[in-house]
Every structure is written in structure tokens, then in C-alpha cells.
Image (cartoon, rainbow, N blue to C red):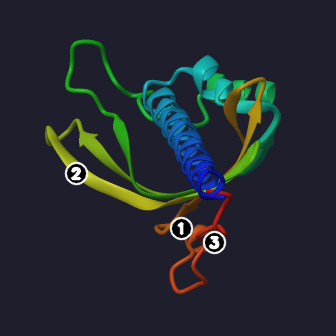
Amino acid sequence: MKSRSVAAILLSCLATTAMADGYGDDRAAIENLQGRYVLAMDFNDPDEYAGVFAEDGVLDWAGGEVVGREAIRKFMMDGIYNLSRNAQAAAWPATTRHFITNQVIEVYGDTAKAVTYWFQVNNNAASREAAYGLFGHYEDELARIDGEWLFSRRTIYNEGIQTRARAGMENPAPEKGQY
């Protein structure tokens, strides 16, 4: 009887460790995905930018929805959101860098939800200074497809645009996941 109890406790500990390891791996992969997104945006890399979305992924931004990986790639290739389009080679760059901070990531098997704060810093080429820009948060729906986490939907809230602000509204943190 005692050996069964010990075995049950050991199995419980192993299962808990496996769940925790799984969450850590999922969270790290999702954080990497978010990092690849901001790097691709800031360095105007349409292929990498589109590559973080599922084939039928949705980018919901201040200009509306862009649906599908190919449409998202075209959106970036067309320069609609090229933050360094006025930069000149070997000159003080007029560009933007995005930073992501506070994150809540909840995993539900092969899907996940995340809320992540962002802010941006801009190089002002005329005054040769960096300046704090805008801020907001992302609300993400993610899917694990063929073992890889991708955005199925990314909604961008920008506290500097009245129609895209969420200040004073309900906390957007997702419900607790499986871990």
C-alpha cells in the first residue's frame, strides 16, 4: 500500500514537471515569435513579417484588417507600413524601433492567447535625437501548426489613436490556460 502511494506521488510530480516544461517551451516559442514580428516590422522584411502569421492569419491594425499571409506580405511590400522608407544609406536614419514588455501568455493545447504591451522609439533625423513615440498593446490569438506557433490573429491597439485605444476598458488578459 505504501509503495502505491509513493508511486502515485512520483507520477504526479513527473506529470507536473512535464506540464511546466511544456509551458516554458510554448512560452519561449511564442515570445520568439513576437520578437521576430517586431524585428521584421522595424527592418521592413515582408517575408519574415508575413511568415509569423498562419496562412489564413489576420492582422488587425489602425488601417483595418489584412487577411491571409500573402495579403500581409503584400501589405508590407507595398510600403504601407515601412517605418524607415525615408532613411538614407549612411545617414542618420529616420526610423522606428518597437519594444515589447509586459506579457500574459496562456496556452490551451495547440492554441494560445497573449496580451503584450508595446512602445516605440523614433529617430528624428532632423534633430539627430531619439524620441519616445507611441504605445499600446497587442491582443493575439495563436495556433500551433506543424509544431510551430503562429499568429492566427494579431490585433494592435494604439493608445495614441482614439479609435484604437483601450484605456479605461476591461482588462484584456486572457483566461488562465491549461498550465
Q: Secondary structure at mark 1?
A: loop
Q: Are marks 3 and 2 in contact (CB under 8 Å)?
A: no
Residue type at mark 2 is: Ala
Identify the residue at the far bottom of this view: 168
Q: What is the number of the mark on residue 161?
A: 1
Q: In the displayed structure, would residue 45 be above or below residue 158?
A: above
Does residue 119 appear to the left or right of 4 in the view shown?
Answer: left
Q: CA distance from mark 2 to mark 1?
A: 18 Å
Q: Nearer the viewer, residue 113 or 65?
A: 113
Residue type at mark 1 is: Ile
Residue 48: % across, % down:
59, 21
Q: Which residue is mark 2?
A: 131
Q: Which residue is mark 3?
A: 163
Q: CA distance from mark 3 to mark 2?
A: 24 Å
Q: Earlier in the sequence, mark 3 or mark 2?
A: 2
Residue 69: % across, % down:
77, 28
Q: Quadrant of the N terminus?
A: bottom right
Identify the residue at the far top of this view: 90
Residue 141: % across, % down:
71, 51
